[in-house]
Amino acid sequence: MAQQSDKEQMLAALNMKSTEELFGDIPKGVRSEITEIQNGLCEPATRSRISSLLARNRPAGKMSSFLGGGSYDFYIPSAVKSVTGRSEFLTSYTPYQPETSQGLLQVLFEYQSMMCELTGMDVVNNSLYDYSTGLGEAALMASRLKPGKVFLIPETISWPRFSVLQNYCKGPGISLVKYRYDRKTGLTDIADFKSKLSGDVFGALVETPNCLGVLESQVDEIRQALGDRILVAGVNALSLAAVRPPGDYGADIMISEGQMFGNPTNFGGPMLGIMGCKKTHVRKMPGRVIGLTDDIEGRRAYCMTLQTREQHIRREKATSNICSNEALTTVATASYLALRGGSGLRETAFYTMKKSRELAKAISAVKGCKAPVFSGSYFNEFVASFPVPAETLIEKMSEKGVLPGVEMALDGMEKNLLVAVTDRITDADIKKYAQVLKEVVQ
Amino acid sequence: MAQQSDKEQMLAALNMKSTEELFGDIPKGVRSEITEIQNGLCEPATRSRISSLLARNRPAGKMSSFLGGGSYDFYIPSAVKSVTGRSEFLTSYTPYQPETSQGLLQVLFEYQSMMCELTGMDVVNNSLYDYSTGLGEAALMASRLKPGKVFLIPETISWPRFSVLQNYCKGPGISLVKYRYDRKTGLTDIADFKSKLSGDVFGALVETPNCLGVLESQVDEIRQALGDRILVAGVNALSLAAVRPPGDYGADIMISEGQMFGNPTNFGGPMLGIMGCKKTHVRKMPGRVIGLTDDIEGRRAYCMTLQTREQHIRREKATSNICSNEALTTVATASYLALRGGSGLRETAFYTMKKSRELAKAISAVKGCKAPVFSGSYFNEFVASFPVPAETLIEKMSEKGVLPGVEMALDGMEKNLLVAVTDRITDADIKKYAQVLKEVVQ
Amino acid sequence: MSYRQARHDVPLVYEEYSDDINTNIKFNEYLPKDIIRQAPPNIPRLCERDMVKHFTQLSQMNFGVDSGFYPLGSCTMKYNPKINEEMASLPDACMLHPHQPDSQIQGTLQIMYELQNMLAHITGMHSMSLQPAAGAHGEFTGMLVARAFHEDNGQKRDQVVLPDTSHGTNPASAAMAGYDIVTIPSKEGRVDLDALAAAVSERTAAFMLTNPNTLGIFESDVTEIAKIVHGVGGLLYYDGANMNAIMGKTSPGKMGFDIVHLNLHKTFSTPHGGGGPGAGPVGVVEKLADFLPIPIAAKKGEQYHLDYDRPKSIGKVHGFHGNWGVLLRAYTYILSEGGNGLTEATEMAVLNSNYLRQKVEKYLEIPYPGLRKHEFVASGSALKKNGVKTLDVAKRLIDHGFHPPTVYFPHLVEESIMIEPTETESKATLDAFAAALEKVVGESPEVLHNAPTCASVRRLNETDAAKNLILSYRDYLAFKAR
Amino acid sequence: MSYRQARHDVPLVYEEYSDDINTNIKFNEYLPKDIIRQAPPNIPRLCERDMVKHFTQLSQMNFGVDSGFYPLGSCTMKYNPKINEEMASLPDACMLHPHQPDSQIQGTLQIMYELQNMLAHITGMHSMSLQPAAGAHGEFTGMLVARAFHEDNGQKRDQVVLPDTSHGTNPASAAMAGYDIVTIPSKEGRVDLDALAAAVSERTAAFMLTNPNTLGIFESDVTEIAKIVHGVGGLLYYDGANMNAIMGKTSPGKMGFDIVHLNLHKTFSTPHGGGGPGAGPVGVVEKLADFLPIPIAAKKGEQYHLDYDRPKSIGKVHGFHGNWGVLLRAYTYILSEGGNGLTEATEMAVLNSNYLRQKVEKYLEIPYPGLRKHEFVASGSALKKNGVKTLDVAKRLIDHGFHPPTVYFPHLVEESIMIEPTETESKATLDAFAAALEKVVGESPEVLHNAPTCASVRRLNETDAAKNLILSYRDYLAFKAR
Ligand SMILES: Cc1ncc(COP(=O)(O)O)c(C=O)c1O
Ligand SMILES: Cc1ncc(COP(=O)(O)O)c(C=O)c1O
């Protein structure tokens, strides 16, 4: 900010006596002041105020946490933080001027490239706000691709995702119809699914794993049943190191959440909405994409492309209103993926699968407890049932330093929890879970 | 590190089967292995091991700490950390190739420039390890400048400084002779000082503030008494915002400690040994210096200069053996000084002086306690006396979250503490000191 | 030129690195054969050294605010204090999980609660939702709230009116919420009251406006505007991306607006991260408060909780609670600035803008007379006679070490150059920029067409990018194989 | 060239900024008039925005390991994992005060204690002091220990012998400890046993050696060397700056050395910070243990303490306990590498060095045959016939995006180019460097004399710098006024 003398000089250049004159165009009647915010604090005071407020938190990351349900506390390598800390990335805007923004653009292009490989999709865009808004955008995009007013969704979908989706569907008046899941396996009830495929259905969402943690094994059947309707696959991005990616079974649109790839849980935000699609659909896709081209000397270069889909050009006809996105989390994700590589992702996937099965076994060994509840296969997250209400369990167990899982909103699941395992879970954490569970249920 | 396939290709290029062949020149008889260090940990395991070890510390920075004695916990602005975190500074070596290291070189030149202004010296070098080794180097430098074998030092000097100085003086066989301090004022006993100025004395150290916290008011008299012998002034760098700098009273050599300027206390290291001198002495000075010059196109540029004094050129005839120094702490210090400016340093100096006087008053108000003990003026640190042994006081008070000061090694000062105030001390801390002191001495 | 951006020859990760670690992991033990992925994903595996080198080199080819002046109009590219970053990365902040019970997140809830109140006060609104993840997301949320409100009143309004100078997200957000867009032309850079009066009707759900508008001009008729819109039962929507022009001087509430979104990543000091994340809280007047998204941070006695018990709420617009990391930065910023500092920030933003404008108008046309607020729009149309476009000027500024201003927006001004100096820049910087721009404007067309020459690349073939659509390394290989 | 370093026109802080804040602070209340400083120190006061911009721009004109290959011989410019930095900046580590009582620093003392043991094991020594703040400081400490030992034995030895290839700090440190230096010439790049035997006597306090030596050649005669030195009652000193050549393969102890210093900031992974800080722990055999500096971290039962009760100790060499921040990084590094990882690091350092040497010797002379360890020295003397110097080659490498190797050291090799690729570099990097060096060697003298052209400045007038001695902004003003 300008020093005092500069301020005076600038005012003088404007023939003004005080900054008040700069606001002469604001009618007296609408003038107001900030009266209820105290004066500014110096940096040390700010720091101590914030730290002491935050000290009232008891962050999951300092406990044995088995929370998931869309946000996962995977280990973040120091090197990833050092990349996102580079001020050239951190303090830049959307790369509207590609010549001076090649660094970020290449990173974003690499993000797209790696994500295409991980998901098997033709195209991946450069971030939406999160999974839920990605789902909303996917429904809108699907409705642009095919006629119809009905979008099928799984009965298992979590309430927040459902609510966000509903909000996105209000504008075009899309109806959401839920198809049932099999009470034993946790999988899609295919008969029910097929029965709902009326003529007005333009597409369907399949989540795998779904919100019960169950991996859908009937994706090919579903794809077939849908015919030329739009298949939107909602996936766990890390699981794709182990299970067939959506590109493999012909998903038209894929959505996922990338927070787990080098980003902290951060109380649920920033997240990273990943969206991919078939190349044929790309012009209907929302969000930013980076393309490869060259400069006038033939040097390879990168720039934003297909901007004519976007709001700053197409305004109300744009494929979405999105402008600021989650670019920095894609930078984190790109560096995370490059550090892990395909093999490293497989290692991480394997570890969490192994440990989640050990945990399920340990839970089942406690009287009155069962895990997993559903017989369908799962990735790193499963539903467990307990002899006590979920709420009580969470309260009692977290007093002893264990966050045992996320409450379920589905009917009749008041004594169930969705339990997740990440690569930060050690054998000691699992032992502690079993131990504390035993103490609490007895 | 190379991937497996690379390793094989490199070995093949060398016609080797295994890396073992690379060590064929090491005689069998001297081969050995690392057997007592466990296998490497992955990053998360390393992190949790280190964090849990460190959790056994109880850092002063989290208590109300009045520790000083050469290391001071002043507030470090976030922006300073962001500067030292820039990997271009952090991961570079000594700028032997100036063309590709202009950024660091300019910072170091700016450090020199600002330090010259703060200290009033003609030249400031680019860091020695710390105050104590700076003192050692200063004695050696002084002995190169004037004939003689005796170096006068204050009786008040702390034992660590004295011990380091002794070690530096062993080589050339310099004798250290202590001059007395006035028991009431804490100042130099001028009569005693003068009486020790024998023909063999080549120089003297004056500390201001000295290790009792007392600011020397007789610097001009001392300077005069020394004649053309070397005056080495040991100063508190921040105090120079308030008190006359050594350049002002004709010090030949100045040493100080720069840790307080943007560097954490860090259990006493890294520190920042500051050394300055008169321009006429520069060729006898130890340590690196940066000079301003230009490139062949006339563009202003910076490079290391006077390297012919240094060990890599002059070997045993060098002015010092120093090679790696504390460059990064000078970067922190340069950015800290630029953020504070002359006026900001004065503000900080004033604040700590004010609060230290409030503290002294609060201590004196407790029965049996007195502060300051000496009547000479002081900067941010003073000696206080208590009705209980210092050790007991420290133990009892720190149980209640207050670190009351540093023990004194001088004879008869077993119930005294050296008490320091920094800009991190608030009114609440001072209140707490008085409160806890009362509880403990009663 | 003295300035020169770094250039490294950095191949794509795929071209330089591979993944030769054969982990030999099989998932058969855990998964049925037909859902297992056979080959590992084709993602190279870099050791830490190579990864850090790769991204460090790339970063050096990117311009950020910390590297220099970034007068991108409408984007408020000001400097953001480092303490914000430090606070947001404290474990007690970033290690929270969104599914933790309220009792474990009291600090965060208190901060959210206080932030809601602070932002409500600053905007003159009754209630705030912190959930939207960006400005456009806030607009969309605001439109949904408007919709819910009208429906609750039994009204089926289907149009949203806005001026032609509005930001593209305004019409896009309203359209996403299901509204038809009615665009009204501006008159002398301001809302044309007659056109507005003619456009609004009982079909009008809302009128969207930013004030100062995108020309940096304050809509002094705002009270009349409000009367016209309210007169037909419409709501007045405030796009708060320009709040750094008015904080402490007026407020949307005072001006008669019913719904406001803020861009915390502009006014309230979160770095843009190359495009995001941001946060776009939405504030509303009392009659709309019930419709805001759930949950909202609330206080009962000394305890804070997430209040879901709001039956009229539109529900959720984000999977969790919005971008907490950004909210915390904004809270930190407001604490350190204080009410006084925010007001001073506005003063400096507006002073800088008018000062710079006064210099620029000596050599570039600046349509519409009078004061500007935090930004102004110049026109490069006079250069067209030499065959020079605004784009050329923008590219040439790169060679002078500056990030170019926003160009070709707003569309109202031909060959527009939209300059927002922001409050954190010094007079010296503004002087240097004004001098550079003057120099550029006087340079030969060849030089300008040729620019930039000092960035890591020369001017791009952007049309090729849209034609060939190479959006991944896989596409690139296919393209090369053609 | 494709590579280009960034260039910003960054005036000195003094030229761009001033301090116009009149604080009006008076110290009269607290200090007698005649010791008060009248005018505030002339230091400009930058707002945070300007400060960060200034230093960010400068940083972009500086080459670091993270930006690329840095094969500076003798300096071990390897990549240092970021986890080290993160651990060293934890509040539980960096907020400790050196005067805290032992009971409050148990974690730190345990780390120091374990680090002492680990380093003792790696070097084959009996005891370690962690106090020295750099390699040279360790050498000086080691020499003081040698001196104390001899004096304790009633011997007044006054000479230190060392080979002409030794690092400059070796003779400088020994001289500072009061010794006369006896330099012996090398024979075929190794210690000349006869010359050594002739040089040592009952005046010899110690023989200083690094093995592998500065040519990267392992002194296979080390056992004979030890015999000769020990034969006259001298001590054998090991300069451990090259430990990444031998860890896990041999150890100074095994080779017969009595005193060792390590450069933690080389082998044990602390970034160099533009020249420091480092840490130079000193290890000794049992008979010398009593003389090490105090305090040393010790363990009694489950409690750790700083042991000052060592009556024969030389006392202190640092005001506090050495560079704890660096010690912690080294400890973190050793934990993450483990014994196996350290050994592999050695293998890769030596493999990389020999691989690169094999490529370089195709176009540059590399004196002395046989294996190299972690580094090797080539000679540019063949280029002299074209008027090209090693310095020109070094400068030209900058244009290729590499930091130059060490040049003109060791003096033994004419026009020497000392290359240490380190263990963290990939084959691809070595291949690229070898290709660039080959290209450079083949370029025309004009091009080479003209280099660098891609750094932020061209070649410097270094002699002017030494002649005019402008060492501060104040000097600069005076110089300009001349
Ligand atoms: C005036 C205006 N309105 C709305 C927006 C949209 O905000 P966001 O990018 O956060 O979605 C912007 C930002 O570009 C803007 O400048
Ligand atoms: C072989 C050798 N010995 C000693 C040293 C001195 O180490 P330091 O720079 O840490 O003082 C160095 C470092 O330059 C070196 O390379």
Image (spheres, coloured by chain):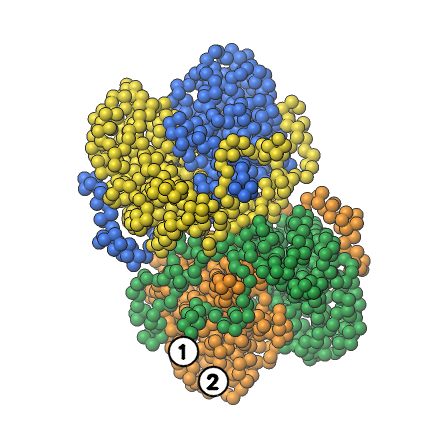
Chain colours: A blue, B orange, C yellow, D green
Q: Which residue occupies 54% across, 52% down?
A: D4
Instruction: Specify the subunit that label 2 lies on.
Output: B
Q: Nearer the viewer, residue D150 or A308?
A: A308
For mark 2, what is the residue?
A: B228
Q: Does label 2 or label 1 sit earlier along the sequence? A: 2
User: Can residue A322 be seen from the camera position used here?
Assistant: yes
Q: Is residue A337 above or below residue D120?
A: above
Q: Is residue B407 above or below residue D178?
A: above
For mark 1, what is the residue?
A: B249
Decide if residue D4 is on the left or right side of residue C362: right
**Secondary-structure class at tag 1:** helix
**Secondary-structure class at tag 2:** loop
Q: Residues within 10 Å of mark 1 (few under 14, many from 20)?
A: some
Decide if residue C467 is on the left or right side of residue C309: right
Q: Nearer the viewer, residue B398 or B85?
A: B85
Instruction: Specify the subunit that label 1 lies on.
Output: B
Counting from the top left corner in percent of width and height, residue B307 is at 57, 70
Q: Residues within 10 Å of mark 2 (few under 14, many from 20)?
A: few
| Residue sticking out furthest to the front | C385
Label 2 – label 1 distance at C-alpha: 13 Å
Q: Which residue occupies 58% across, 20% down?
A: A219
Q: What is the quadrant of residue D291 in the picture? A: bottom right
Decide if residue D164 is on the left or right side of residue B291: right
Kindly identify the amino acid type of the residue bearing the numbered disc 1.
Answer: Tyr
Kindly identify the amino acid type of the residue bearing the numbered disc 2.
Answer: Asp
Q: Which residue occupies 40% across, 63% down?
A: D14
Task: For the C terminus of chain B, give its image quadrant.
Answer: bottom left
